[in-house]
Amino acid sequence: MSLPRGKFITLEGTEGVGKTTNLTFIQEWLEQKNVPLIVTREPGGTPLAEELREMLLRKRDEPVDASAELLMVFAARAQHLNQVIRPALERGEWVLCDRFTDATYAYQGAGRGLSLEMIETLENLVQEELRPDLTIVLDIDVETGLARASDRAALDRFESEAVEFFHRVRGGYRTRVAQQPDRYRVIDAGQNLKAVQSDVAAVLEQLGL
Ligand code: T5A
C-alpha cells in the first residue's frame, strides 16, 4: 500500500527576513503535532548541493554570469529534489524547506533580470509536476532585513548586492503571490518576533492538524 504523499512547505523572503529563526519555530510546531518531518534548505540539502551553495555564495573577483548562476541553482535543486525531497514525500514525510524555486523567480528572475520563461522551462524540466503545497513569504522592508543580516554575520555574495537589487527581489515575490494567491501566505516580518510567530502559528492552524 502506498502512503499518501507528505506535504511540501517552503519559506521565502528577502535577506535577513527571519527565515532560519521561523523555520525552527515551524519545525517545533509540526513536531508537537507528531508530523513526520524533514527540514532542509536551498541551495543545499545534500553534500553535492551544499558544495554548489558554497560556490554560489562565495564572493569572488570574477563576475558571475547570471545564467551560470541560474544553472548552478537548478543543478543543486535537481540533486536535492531527487536525493532528499522526493524520497521523503514518497515515504509520507513532510518537507520543510528554507527557500525553493520562488527564490529563483525572485533573485535570478526579478533581481538579475533573467527571462521568467527560461526559469519556468528549467522548473518543469527539473521538478516535473512537483510544486510546494504551501509557501510562507516573510515580507520586510529591504533596509531592515539587510541591517538584520549584516548584524548577524559577514555579508555573502548575494547580500553584497546594491539595495536596488533587493527591491527588485521583493517585487518578484509580490508578483508571484499576486499570480497564485492560494499557495502563498504573506506575513509581516517587520513585527517583533513574538508577533511574527503568532502569525505563522495562525497559518499553521489552517492546516487542520
Ligand atoms: N538564492 C537562493 C538564489 O539566488 N536563488 C535561489 O533559487 C535560492 C534557493 C542564500 C542565498 O541564495 C540565494 C538567495 C540568498 O541570498 P539563504 O541563506 O537562505 O540563501 O538566505 P539569507 O536570506 O541570507 O538567509 P539568512 O539565514 O541570512 O537570513 P534569514 O534566515 O532570513 O534570517 P535569520 O532568521 O537568520 O534572521 C536574521 C537576524 O534577524 C533576527 C535574527 O535573530 C537574526 O539575528 N531576527 C529578528 N530580529 C527582530 N525581529 C524579528 N522579527 C526577527 N526575526 C529574526
Image (tube, rainbow, N blue to C red):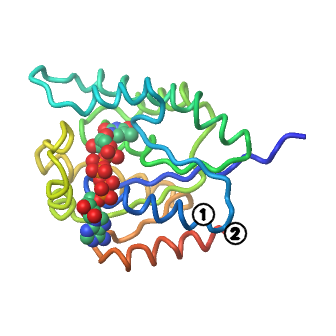
Residue 202 point in image, percent of width and height: 53, 76
User: What residue is drawn where x is 15% and y is 31%?
Assistant: 59
User: What residue is drawn where x is 50% and y is 56%?
Assistant: 135
Identify whether 14 is placed above or below 78. below
For the image shown, how many numbered marks are present on the structure?
2
Q: Is residue 110 left or right of residue 74?
A: left
Q: Is residue 62 left or right of residue 4?
A: left
Which amino acid lies under the numbered mark 2 shown in the image of this protein?
Leu
Identify whether 130 is placed above or below 136. above
Which amino acid lies under the numbered mark 1 shown in the image of this protein?
Leu
Residue 183 point in image, percent of width and height: 55, 57
Callout 2 secondary element: loop
User: What residue is drawn where x is 15% and y is 58%?
Assistant: 151
Identify the mark at residue 21; answer none if there is no mark.
none
Identify the mark at residue 30; answer none if there is no mark.
1
Q: How crowded is mark 2: few (under 14 residues within 10 Å), some or many (20 or more)?
A: few
Which residue is denoted by mark 2 in the rendering? 209
Residue 113 point in image, percent of width and height: 25, 36
Q: Distance between the residues labelled 1 and 2?
A: 9 Å
Callout 1 secondary element: helix
User: What residue is drawn where x is 48% and y is 27%?
Assistant: 121
10 and 165: which one is in front? 10
The quarter of the image holding the C terminus is bottom right
Marks 1 and 2, the one that precedes in the sequence: 1
Q: Is residue 52 visible?
A: yes
User: Are dots 1 and 2 in contact, CB under 8 Å?
Assistant: yes
